[in-house]
Every structure is written in structure tokens, then in C-alpha cells.
Image (spheres, rainbow, N blue to C red):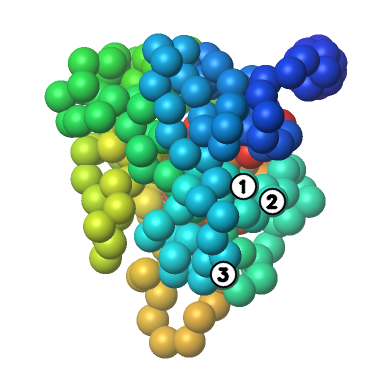
């Protein structure tokens, strides 16, 4: 409740001349100051174009997104959507790489400099970014996962991956894992649309209880994408405001 009251109070302030989604960026990322003249203004004075004004196909949204496009699909929090999404409905899969690089680091060496190793879920250790306290948020998630009944533990008994500066399979786009802001759970109990054989069929084994813990701390889930990736969680607090 306090978080929602804080958001309400902040939303009454003027973060710029653009729209509510630009304000959500300013609330969610300390590096963002405001939006002015259709540009996101960062606290160091640098700027990135917010909205290029183009109407885009799904493929163009993926490959040539501006910052405003990141909000193209509404992310349905909690149980609001827990099942097969509509075709090409991928909330959060649309990313502006220049924005992500500005927040987390513009190169592999810069992102690595911000990494730390933390304990996670029953004795494992993972490398994640310290940017915006993501390491602390994952520590809090870990405690909540460990407190779940034993039947849930198999889903994070192994970790599929965290930091890895790489491109998304089959694309030229950097993965959110490149920034240390994403985590994949146990591959054994996960499904990924590229692994599917034959006709498209949505698949998922990850319980909503686990998803809700991650969402509580600002992470969206790839299981809410038409192009599903049910092991995948990434920090995108602007989509959960």
C-alpha cells in the first residue's frame, strides 16, 4: 500500500512534457530526470529520443523500438493474465537498447564493473548487477522463495543463468541478461517458444506464486509473452507501476 501511495504522490509532480509512461521511467530509474521536448533527459544531462512518431509492425517494434514503444503492450500483473497470451502480445519484450545501455552500462566491461555475487535460493550463488539495488531486490526474492513450501523448490533448485553479455538467440538485439538485470530459473521445468516443435502451443509449469513474488519486487515474467520464456524474469519496474 505504501508503494502505491508513493507512486500516487509522485505522479502529482511534473516530470516533464511527455506522458504518464515517461513519468513512470523517472519514478522507476534514478538515472532519469524528466522528459522534455520529446526526449528523456538523464541526470547527467544526456538525452535520448522518446517517441519517433512511427507506427510499427510487430517486427519493427522488436528490432527498432524507441523508448515510448517499450510501453506498447500493457503488462498484466498477478493473476490478471495467467495463461496463453494473444498472438504477438509480448509485454516487456519490446526494449530500447540505447536506454538499457544508458541505465546499466554501454559495454560488457562497464556492466561487469557493476556486478556482484549474491546467495540465492537454498545455497546457490549468482552474479547480478548492483545498479538500482537489483542485487538487494533479488536477495529479498530469494528469502521469499526459500520460505515457500517444499513443493515449489524444484523450480529454482537450479538456476538457468543470470549475467551474460550476449545477443538474444536468432536476433541482433542484446539480451537483458547482458545487463545483469535478468534471471532464468530451472530449465528443467521451463518452456521456451523456440524449443517448441510443430504448431504453436503455449506451455508453462511455473506456479503463479513464484511469479507474484518476482513481480512484487519489480520483475516481469516471460511467461506472459506470446513468445513465451517461462524461466525468464527481468527487472522492468516501469511496467509494474
As drawn, 120 above or below 190: above
From the viewer's perspective, is 237 left or right of 163?
right
Per the image, the residue denoted by label 1 is 71
Per the image, the residue denoted by label 3 is 88
Q: Position of residue 206 (x, y in %)?
A: 57, 50
Q: Position of residue 135 (x, y in %)?
A: 42, 17
- Residue at the far bottom in the pictured view: 198
The image quarter containing residue 190 is: bottom left
- Residue at the far front in the pictured view: 37
- Residue sitting at x 52%, y 33%: 39
- Residue sitting at x 46%, y 13%: 43
How much space separates mark 2 and mark 3, taking CA atoms? 12 Å
Per the image, the residue denoted by label 2 is 74
How much space separates mark 1 and mark 3, taking CA atoms? 14 Å
From the viewer's perspective, is 184 left or right of 54?
left
Residue 232 in sight: no
Q: Quadrant of the C terminus?
A: top right
From the viewer's perspective, is 188 left or right of 225?
left
**Is label 1 or label 3 in front?**
1
Amino acid at each position: 500500500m505504501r508503494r502505491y501511495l508513493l507512486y500516487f504522490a509522485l505522479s502529482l509532480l511534473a516530470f516533464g512534457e511527455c506522458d504518464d509512461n515517461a513519468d513512470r521511467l523517472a519514478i522507476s530509474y534514478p538515472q532519469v530526470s524528466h522528459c522534455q521536448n520529446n526526449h528523456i533527459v538523464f541526470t547527467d544531462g544526456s538525452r535520448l529520443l522518446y517517441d519517433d512518431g512511427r507506427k510499427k509492425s510487430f517486427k519493427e517494434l522488436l528490432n527498432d523500438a524507441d523508448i515510448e514503444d517499450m510501453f506498447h503492450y500493457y503488462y498484466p500483473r498477478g493473476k490478471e493474465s495467467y495463461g496463453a497470451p494473444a498472438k504477438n502480445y509480448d509485454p516487456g519484450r519490446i526494449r530500447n537498447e540505447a536506454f538499457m545501455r544508458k541505465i546499466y552500462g554501454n559495454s560488457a566491461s562497464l556492466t561487469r564493473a557493476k556486478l556482484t555475487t549474491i546467495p540465492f535460493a537454498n545455497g546457490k550463488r549468482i552474479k547480478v548487477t548492483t545498479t538500482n539495488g537489483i542485487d538487494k531486490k533479488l536477495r529479498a526474492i530469494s528469502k521469499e522463495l526459500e520460505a515457500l513450501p517444499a513443493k515449489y523448490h524444484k523450480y529454482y533448485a537450479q538456476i538457468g543463468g543470470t549475467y551474460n553479455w550476449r545477443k538474444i538467440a536468432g536476433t541482433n538485439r542484446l539480451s537483458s541478461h547482458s545487463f545483469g538485470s535478468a534471471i532464468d530459473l530451472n530449465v528443467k521445468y521451463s518452456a521456451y517458444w523456440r524449443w517448441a516443435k510443430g504448431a504453436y502451443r503455449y506451455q508453462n509449469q511455473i506456479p503463479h506464486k513464484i511469479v507474484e513474488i518476482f513481480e512484487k519486487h519489480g520483475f516481469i515474467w516471460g511467461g506472459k509473452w506470446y513468445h513465451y520464456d517461462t524461466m525468464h524474469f527481468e527487472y522492468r519496474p516501469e511496467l509494474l507501476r
